[in-house]
Image (tube, rainbow, N blue to C red):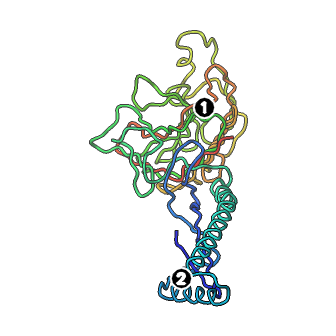
Amino acid sequence: MTIWEEWIGPQRLFGSDERVLGTDRRGIFHNDFGETGEPETISALWHPTNEKRDIDLQGNTDCTLFTTKYMNRRTGITKKTCWGLMIIVCFCVGFLACKEKKEQRPVEESAAASVEEGDGFVQIFDGKTLEGWKGDPTYWRVENGNLVGEVTPTTLLKNNTFIVWQGGQPDDFELKLEFRIEEAGNSGINYRSDSLDTIPHALRGYQADIDGKIRYTGQNYEEKKRTTLAYRGEKVVISAQENPDTPGSLRANVDKNCWQSRAIMASLGSSDSLKAKIKFEDWNECHLVVKENRLKHYVNGILMSDVIDNDTINRKLSGLLGVQVHVGPPMKVEYRNIRLKQL
């Protein structure tokens, strides 16, 4: 903070300039879950004078002496008394300036918060560290501001592995992020999921599927459970299997990697026509709208799949959130601008 001074006749006014931290469009300053991150850019709102002046000590001393002599001659006040009065005046002016600054700050912070919150989405990945996320560092890192999952020829997987957000278990929410994946890649965004004790860094639950060849991107696939719930271009209603209390009934209700107790209610477009809206090996935006038992997956603003899950036996209404790298050949997937809004 910089002290500024300005002379007006024989009086000196004291104050201070002030800056207020803002955030960039991504809003990485803080979030509602106790995580912190450094903003990529910081804007400063300066004092209205917008001017910092150098202090001329010799000039200030001369002026003070002039004022003292003038007061001695006209009023009979001693120099010692004069100095005391000047100190009191300076203290009072400084106190008022601090009080004014304190009173104005809540308004400024409120304005900054409104910019940060915007439409209610909160950044949950800071673009610099893996703080707030938990996964195997062999496969996950931060690079050029992106969350990178990579499998190399020397780190081939035996099981799918996830990096999981540690900020809670969302129930109703919207999630927006951007992804880019290599042609050989296989990934996905898991939500309302459970962790598995038997496999490290594994999740079981709903997944917004993503793959480099764009065969599955946009569909709703339930990892390690009911498998495919909706292919790309489908609006479906899901129901429970028959005899759910019978051991093995869940696996018995899966055929060709697809849940059998489902009814297609409408078409959102052909799989190929929707595929044409997804960019190959380039950045795409994924938007999930998850509310109660309705699960919508959008890519680049286009609805790709729509699930109404009436299966009260197997569905979940809250759970963990994470992203995946899949068993298979070497691959790389990148995520950025990961934003969450609780509904």
Tell me the residue at 60%/10% (across/down): 245
Q: Residues within 10 Å of mark 1 (few under 14, many from 20)?
A: many
Tell me the residue at 54%/73% (across/down): 3
Residue 264 placement, left or right of 328: right
Q: Which residue is mark 2?
A: 53
Is residue 272 visible from the viewing direction of this image? no
Residue 88 location in percent, x, y? 62, 70
Q: Which residue is mark 1?
A: 229
Q: Nearer the viewer, residue 209 or 205?
A: 205
Tell me the residue at 51%/85% (across/down): 61
As drawn, 102 above or below 311: below
Tell me the residue at 45%/56% (across/down): 145
As drawn, 127 above or below 196: below
Q: Residues within 10 Å of mark 2 (few under 14, many from 20)?
A: few
Residue 116 location in percent, x, y? 62, 56
Residue 263 placement, left or right of 339: right
